[in-house]
Amino acid sequence: MGEENRSLKRAYNKLVNNPVIEDYALRYAPKSFRRWSEFTVANAALGGIAYLADFAIGGSLAVSYGFSSAIVGIIIAFVIIFLTGIPIAYYASKYHIDMDLLTRGSGFGYLGSTITSIIYATFTFIYFSLEGSVMAQAISLYFGVDIHIAYAIAALIMIPLVVYGMTFLSKLQLYTQPLWFILMIVPLIAILSNNPSSLSIWTGFGGEVHYSGLNPLYAGLAAGVVLSLIAQIGEQVDYLRFMPDQNEKNKRKWITMVLLAGPGWVILGLFKQIYATFLAANVSSEVGFVKATEPIYQFLYGYHYILGYGFIALTIATIFVVISQIKINVTNAYSGSLSWSNFFSRLLHIHPGRVVWLVLNVMIGLTLMELGVFYALNFVLGFYSNVAIAWIGAIVSDLLINKHLLKVSPPLVEFKRGYLYNINPVGFGSMIIASIMSILAFFGFLGSLAQAYSPFIALAISFILAPIIAILTKGKYYMARKPSLRINKMDEEVQCVVCGYKYESPDILDCPYHKGHICSLCCTLEKECHDMCKKEVKL
């Protein structure tokens, strides 16, 4: 295109230009916006862990596989989730970038991470639908409305709550946390105090398989379902990117909060799923196996020891469920809006604003709710975990091995289009191969043992392949060109020649097409340059 077109300023709409609404959906989170303390950010991140899908998952696993297999599978899965979450949380907090931007610079390339954007978006709307279903079950039972109407209420109420992003969500999570915790713990205390046989009922629970002992195949299948939660670290990172900079003064507090709110979410997750197996085992004799997996019946059973099976018990149980599900589904909706923003900005070079993709994510989640995804929980999550863990395994391998041990990956995590190859075979290739092999195993093509442990196959292959491919390619496909921008301070503001706004230097790059400095979003949305800045190194 001619010089005349290059000089035209890009004008963003009001949704994109408002940082409180947009929340830097496609950008580095600047220091000027990160005004929250370490505790506030960590508390907001952990607020979403109030979700009750853990109770649905734990209850479902106990019913499907019995006590011992469910417990062992849950513990194995959460150990893996914790360990893989540590490097991801650290790098995202250090460089103030979300999961998609981290993926780009961790072995996937600029366009290679579009697939992982879909994987992550899928996680958010699958869990949005599961959490929304739990909330709808409570609304339907309490108010007597049709379940399909309750689905719509549970989904659509999230849109106005998520519009203002981190600014509102940090306050919501802070003020609801104490009440939520009390309402969760009281039923456990009530059952243990009033039913001495509850523990023996739990440990002897055989579920549908009528076997409470350990079966290695059942334990593997249970772990596979729980491992679908490995992508939860992405939602933690969507908050952790707003951490203040680490320095000598706050180093200990910073690391503690990052560990607690990053991989540390599994501590509460593990407790909730084991708690759920206890509730399901005890309530199943009264309501049957199907309803024993529904959190509203689990907690109604707990509260009845204090309040009986009357209106007050149902009211408190419903309040608890609604608070819990609002706390998590605002996070699911928020994270999904970020992921869709990243996906469509690269695929179509458009960005109408995070709020537009928020509505899309909510509507997809509502559709799944109406289709009854809750009642296919084990299959849906078991299948999804194969792809999710292949993605996470490749990232973790790149951050730990390729960057630190082999040093074939750049020490900094670069996310800007103008500096990256479109496809980096290191992460992208290892994820694709691992996903294919584990999905074949999941559907039984590699035998019953491999079927039960298919997510572990995905993790092993992606983790091992990433450094092998990095060595074979000699790290060639990480950086398409070296940055030439001279920066005096990390928080120095530089004006973008395309949109005219000023951004902190980590969000700026030099552009030969526009002959000046441009921001990362203008670079992402540029349709006419045809990647001329890296035309000799296209992949």
Image (cartoon, rainbow, N blue to C red):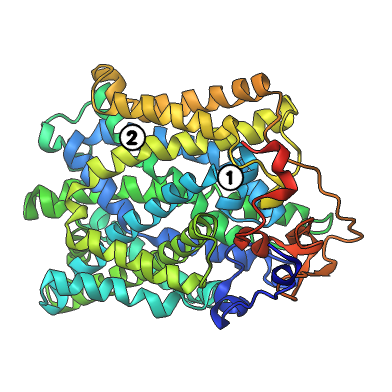
Q: Say which quarter of the image contains residue 221.
A: top left
SS under mark 2: helix
Residue under label 2: 224
Packing grade of label 2 (10 A; few <14, some 14-19, many >=20) is many
Number of residues whose C-alpha sits closer than 10 Å to that of mark 1, classed few (under 14), some (14–19) or many (20 or more): many
Kind of residue sitting beneath label 1: Thr
Quadrant that contains the C terminus: top right
Q: Earlier in the sequence, mark 1 or mark 2?
A: 1
Residue furthest to the bottom in view is 14
Three-letter code for the amino acid on which mark 2 is drawn? Gly
Residue 85 coordinates in the image, percent (x, y): 55, 43
Q: Identify residue for label 1.
A: 103
Residue 141: image location, x then y, percent: 13, 71
10 or 158, which lies in front? 10
Q: Is residue 531 above or below residue 450?
A: below
Can residue 19 be seen here?
Answer: yes
| Residue at the (77%, 56%) spot, across then down | 246
